Image (cartoon, grey):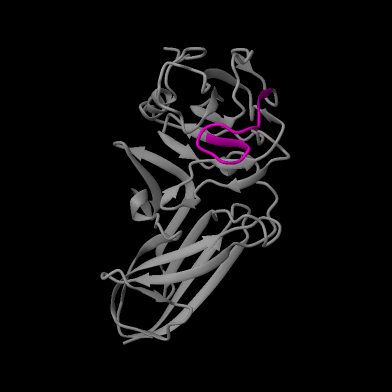
Amino acid sequence: MRWFIKKRRIPGMFFLAFLGGITVLGITYLYPMDWPSQEARITRNFGWNDEGRPSLGNIFLAEGPIRAADKGELIFYHTPSNTASVLPSPLGSWIALEHGDGIIGIYSRFEDMTNPALPDIIDKDVVIASAGQSGWTNQGGFYFSLFDRRERRWVNPSTIIAPLEDTMPPQIQSVLLKTDRNSRIDLSQAKTIRQGRYTVLVAASDTRINPNEIPLAPYRIVCSLNGIEIGVLTFETFSIRDGVLMVYRNSLVPVQQVYSSEQAFEIGEVEFIRGQATLTVIAQDITGNVRNNVYRFLVE
């Protein structure tokens, strides 16, 4: 069966539901893809904590052309001028290209277009749209995401496309312990804590070339207690399981268990017993730069 929805006036959310509804086992990622723009600047990346919700792709601030990241089949496009649905699409104008092996590239929030004259098969680096402003955004540019319909998961584009230059290690802004009464202990200031069970909250971000850039999400956060790993959070994929969005933290867990509304990530729970304790937090970006913070305190 060939899924081909090109040039049909149907609501954008129908196609997103279609993406989430296909289950075919097996996956092979290809690595010849390029970024849709070489000049664009990333303002939000995959995994970013947007007030308690994860970013499922990369948001670019840009002007000029948007190009196909790889050769693909045009399977859907939507523009705000479509009248099949009275509901506005948060993606604004968007195009979906099937790039092979179940990987679908979604290019969105760009300048509105009426009747794009695009062929059924689009070669790599062909201009498919112009950066602009449409959908739920207040800045010009575009939004780019990758969906693996075989495994029903959103994929970090930087795991398939060569990562952009990054010479700066991530920053760890804070490491907090949350009690069962929802109070917070800042480990940068704490010398002693009470024994008991706590949730570890880590606020971490990454900048690529200089510390004054717009902060992005790191690629991985690891937490260990006295040398024993207690939590590993990796921003590689977001999976859909029974309609629930899941992220990998030691295993697949609902994103609500990880994404805090206070711009931090819940790395896991830990039981502290009396004695000296050493908590280590490591943040790593996609190119391998690492930040390592160590906290030593007494548990009473």
Residue 82 position, x and y percent, is 49, 17
Identify whether 68 is placed above or below 254.
above
In magenta segment, residue 134: yes
- Quadrant of the snapshot with the N terminus: top left
Start-end of magenta stretch:
127-145
Taking the image as shown, residue 146 lies to the left or right of residue 271, namely: right
> Which residue shows up at 53% across the image and 42% down it?
156
Residue 254 position, x and y percent, is 33, 48
Q: Quadrant of residue 230?
A: bottom left
Residue 61 position, x and y percent, is 65, 42
- Quadrant of the snapshot with the C terminus: bottom left
Count of numbered circles on the image: 0
> Which residue shows up at 44% across the image and 56% down it?
233
Relative depth, front residue between 84 and 286: 84
> Which residue shows up at 73% across the image and 40% down it?
39
Identify whether 74 is placed above or below 274.
above
Identify whether 72 is placed above or below 254.
above
Residue 237 position, x and y percent, is 46, 43
Taking the image as shown, residue 241 lies to the left or right of residue 47, namely: left
Q: Quadrant of residue 177?
A: bottom left
> Which residue shows up at 54% across the image and 53% down it?
219
In magenta segment, residue 230: no
Taking the image as shown, residue 97 lies to the left or right of residue 130, namely: left
